[in-house]
Structure formats: structure tokens, C-alpha cells
Image (cartoon, rainbow, N blue to C red):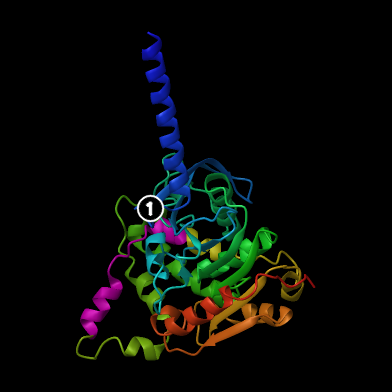
Amino acid sequence: MYALKMRNTLTRCALTVALFCLLNSAVFGQTAEQGAQRIAELGTCELSSGKVILDCRIGYRIFGKLNQERTNAVIMPTWLNGRSEDLLPLFGPTPGPQRLIDTSRFFGVAFDAFGDGISSSPSNSKRQEGTAFPEFTTEDMIRAQYRVLTEVLKVRHVYAAIGLSLGGHQVFAWATLYPQLIDRAVPIVGSPQATNFDRLSKQIVIDAIQSDPAYDNGHYTKQPPLKLANEIGFQMLTTPVFRNAEATRATYSEWLRKIQDPQRQDANDRVWQARAILSHDVLHGRTIEEAARSMPMKFLIIVAAEDRMVTPAPALAWAKAIGAEIYVSHGECAHLIMSCDAAAVSDRVERFLNEPVSKPAAQ
């Protein structure tokens, strides 16, 4: 009997150790599933509006290894209508024109934003489905991601936050919400505050979606086609030169059909994320200069000169206020900066991440 009890005890201990090793290995990114989709169940997420997201979940992916001090994390949120799977080319151990995060050195974390169909969204909520889903802000996105970072991954400090487009907006939100957590911030074609032009471009798309009869005020039973919304979004995303080079006059009809095709994102998800950009403002009554000078971390500001989706001026004003490094892309792809200027962006981000750790004193 004693021998049987000992064997059972040893078996339980072995299982406990194995489970601990498995969990530790998963957190430190030492499994064969690096880059695999993961879901963090957070229970209830409180929003700045006072409303809550029930059964709140955040999608994320991890790459590389977390060091013993848990301080080498580099985080990257998703862009508008994007998912963490779209960020996969930006992570990797091998240098390349699109890589932004060296996973042989850093512990990369890619986050799915609210409304992307992976994290909590109108399209996947069971108890707040469709139009019952509460509106959220970019800062609400970050507060939930912060919980994943600290509660699930047990990360104590962030070496850098990097993001493109809506991801860049979220980088500014990360910096202002958790200024002591982050050493470096790299918003790429992002902004601390949506300008009226930026908001108008999102409002036009929202209106186009809502004007589609098949949208049915958000109560559709199958995805509406949204041809007009797709055409408008496609046109605004980059420059005439870039679009004109994509097709000849002879292939225009085929090119147009591809533009009009239904998109991956659910229609309500698209509206809710666009509304988050309408309200995007991390200044909260401060001037850009006041907000920027209160930040203790280093910034690398990257913008596109011909951007029609995110006006570069607020980010450039932020950089000027603190003397931050700036890169202005003059590529014809504009907001789609990684489509024609990826090598230059990657080079500047890599050099910025290699600079000394010391942060400038808040001004």
C-alpha cells in the first residue's frame, strides 16, 4: 500500500513538474507553436464609457524567448481591419526587408485588437452579439492588452511598442496609459489624435456600410456585399500613382471586381473599429507638446508624406516637441508603407532598437 501511495505521489509530482515546464515553456516561447494563435480569456473588460465587454477575450501570438528578467518584450498591435496573422512577416530571427522585430533577441507579442473578429468583437460575442456589442476606444484596446501582457505573460517591462496605422494609434495609447512600462515607442503611420480629415475618411466608410440595404442597420443574417465601402476604402488607402500601376486599362474590369469583392472582416466589426478611430485622442485636452513632453520613453516617429488615411502632422508635431527621430517616407504606396518602403522602415526600426537603453528625462 505504501509503495502504491508513493508511486501515486511521484506520478502527481511528475505531472505537476511537467505541467509547470509546459506552461513556463509556452510563456517563454520555447515551443514549436511560436506564432500560433492564442486566446486570453479575461472575464469582464471595463470600458472607458462605463460599459463592459462580457466574456472578454484577446487574441495574441508570441515569438522568441522572454528573458529571465522578463524585460525584452516588444509588442505590436494590429492595424485597421487587420489580424495578428497579418503581422507574421514582421517577426522573425532572420533579417529581411519586412522584419521589424528580431525574435532571436526579443520576445515578440502580437495583439489582436477589439473588433478584428479574433478578440472580442460584434461578430463573435455570444452575449453581446452584433449591435448589442458596446463601442470601444483605442485606449480600451490597450487596457485589455495590458492585462494579457501582465496577467497572462507576466511581463514586467516592455522594451518597445511598435505598430502600424491603427496599431500606431495604439502605440501612442500604450505610451500615454503606461508611460513607465515602456522604454521605446515606434508609431508607424499612426497618430496621437485623429484629425478631422482622418475622421471624415472613416465616417465616409461607415456611412457607405450603413447605406447598403443588405447591412440592415447591423441586423444582417449574411455578410452584406458593401461594394461602395470597399471601393472608397481602397481608393483612400494609397496614392493614385500606386493604384494606377496595379492594372492596365484593359484589365480594369477584373481589377475593379477584386476591389468590390466582400472583405474578410465582418461588417459590424468594421464599423466598430472605424468608430474607435473617430474618437481616437490620447491628449485628453492637453496640447500635443504637453502630452509629448510628459513621456519618459524614446520615440521613433515614422510617417508617409502622401498619407490619405492618417494625417502625418500630429505625429510630426509630437516628434518636434521632444526632438525625436523622424523618418518621412516618400514612397508612392503612402499609407501602405510596407508595400514599397519596407527596407527603409525596417532598417530604421532595427537601428532604433539597438540604441542605448537610457531614456530621456521627461521635459
Q: Residues within 10 Å of mark 1 (few under 14, many from 20)?
A: some
Is 158 located above or below residue 256 in the figure? above
User: Going 40% across and 10% down the picture, which residue do you hit?
Assistant: 2
Disc 1 target residue? 37
Q: Is residue 356 visible?
A: yes
Label 1: which secondary element: loop
Q: On the rendered image, what quadrant is the C terminus found in?
A: bottom right
Q: Furthest-front residue in view?
A: 3
Is 55 located above or below residue 201 in the figure? above
The image shows residue 137 at horizontal and vertical percentages of 58, 58
Q: Furthest-right residue in view?
A: 363
User: Going 41% across and 75% down the picture, which residue do you hit?
Assistant: 95
Q: How many marks?
A: 1
The image shows residue 197 at horizontal and vertical percentages of 56, 78
User: Which residue is nearer to you in this view: 293 or 49?
Assistant: 293
- Identify the magenta region: 252-271
Horizontal relation, residue 227 to residue 81: left or right? left
User: Going 39% across and 80% down the picture, which residue do you hit?
Assistant: 339
Horizontal relation, residue 357 to residue 259: left or right? right
User: Which residue is nearer to you in this view: 22 or 136?
Assistant: 22
- Residue 99, by quadrant, is bottom left
Q: Furthest-top residue in view?
A: 1
The image shows residue 38 at horizontal and vertical percentages of 41, 49
Magenta run includes residue 269:
yes
Q: On the rendered image, what quadrant is the N terminus found in?
A: top left
User: Which residue is nearer to you in this view: 255 or 223?
Assistant: 255
| Residue type, numbered disc 1 | Gln
Prevailing secondary structure of the magenta residues = helix
User: Which residue is nearer to you in this view: 350 or 42?
Assistant: 350
Magenta run includes residue 2:
no
The image shows residue 129 at horizontal and vertical percentages of 42, 45
